[in-house]
Image (spheres, grey):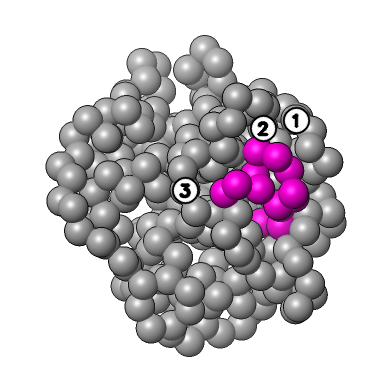
Amino acid sequence: MAVIDTGADWTHPDLAPRVRGGVNILAPGEPPGDDNGHGTHVAGIVAAADNAAGVVGVAPGADLYVVKAFDRDGSAALVDLLQALQWCADYGMQVINMSFGQPASSPALARAVEALTALGAVLVAAAGNGGAGRPVDFPARYPHVLAVTATDPRDTLARSSSRGPEVDLAAPGTGIVSLWPGGRLRSLSGTSMAAAHVAGAAALLLAAEPGLTPGEVRDRLRATAEPLPGLSPAEQGAGLVRPDRALAAAMPVGADGDMAGEGQGIQEGPAAAAQ
């Protein structure tokens, strides 16, 4: 699976066993290192190794590919995001975590999402951190992307979380302890952290049932979510993601399940920010 973000500290002892490769869109030929920290934190939530140290990711057995498209300030030009998505298409990424968002849609970004879905990729994105007054960001707002809001330890919606009819799921996103560059740990909050939980759940589900299509993965995660009392569908979608329930409903098929396909063209356009 791929994490499109600020890169990652692939030498971190909790990440090193899981990172299988990646790309630096901003500096081609250079390793996709993390000069911000956000990407390392997100990658840790998704797939930190179960090695009796630090933290354990949602999918600690996943093969992780680091795609650096965001700079040290946590910003990215749309052209770089599109190149990152094209790389994911070219290399057959099955799950793509997009813990970022922008307020405006882009025809090129919409086409990229459609192309990746057609190739068999499950796309997960942060709903945004604009609070009650701001709608869900793009790309989370697109129909084929799992849009994720953030909850707090009391299973209520984080005040900063965006919300809207496009929301599919909620996940923990307040005070989440995960990895930080330099072999460290740090606590962060936001829908970025929540999206990473759902991406990890999607990776677990595909490992158990590799023949599932992106639509079937989305449907399974929504069908097995836990509705939270007091939260509307615009705040939680189908409810709190429950990987345990999704896996309990899985029917292993024993297929190889390679969802890779031929890369499709992705074009250019404007900008996004990490959530």
* Secondary structure state at the residue bearing disc 1: strand
> Residue 147 lies in magenta, yes or no?
no
**Near-viewer residue (116 or 14):** 14
- The quadrant where residue 182 appears: top right
Q: Earlier in the sequence, mark 3 or mark 1?
A: 3
**Near-viewer residue (129 or 45):** 45
Marks 2/1: CA–CA distance:
5 Å
Q: Residue at x 37, y 42 (%)?
A: 204
- Mark whose residue sits in front, 3 or 2: 3
Is residue 90 at all visible to an observer of this figure?
yes
Question: Residue 185's mark?
Answer: 1
Could you tell me if the residues under marks 2 and 1 are in contact, i.e. CB atoms within 8 Å? yes
> Residue 9 lies in magenta, yes or no?
yes
Number of other residues with Cα within 10 Å of mark 3, as a class: few under 14, some 14 to 19, many 20 or more: many
Q: Is residue 96 above or below residue 193?
A: below
* Secondary structure state at the residue bearing disc 3: loop
Mark 3, residue position = 62
Mark 2, residue position = 178
Q: Give the magenta part as a residue range.
A: 5-18
Marks 3/1: CA–CA distance:
20 Å
Q: Earlier in the sequence, mark 3 or mark 2?
A: 3
* Secondary structure state at the residue bearing disc 2: strand
> What amino acid is at disc 3?
Ala
How far across and how far down the image is residue 3, in percent?
58, 55
**Near-viewer residue (200 or 55):** 55
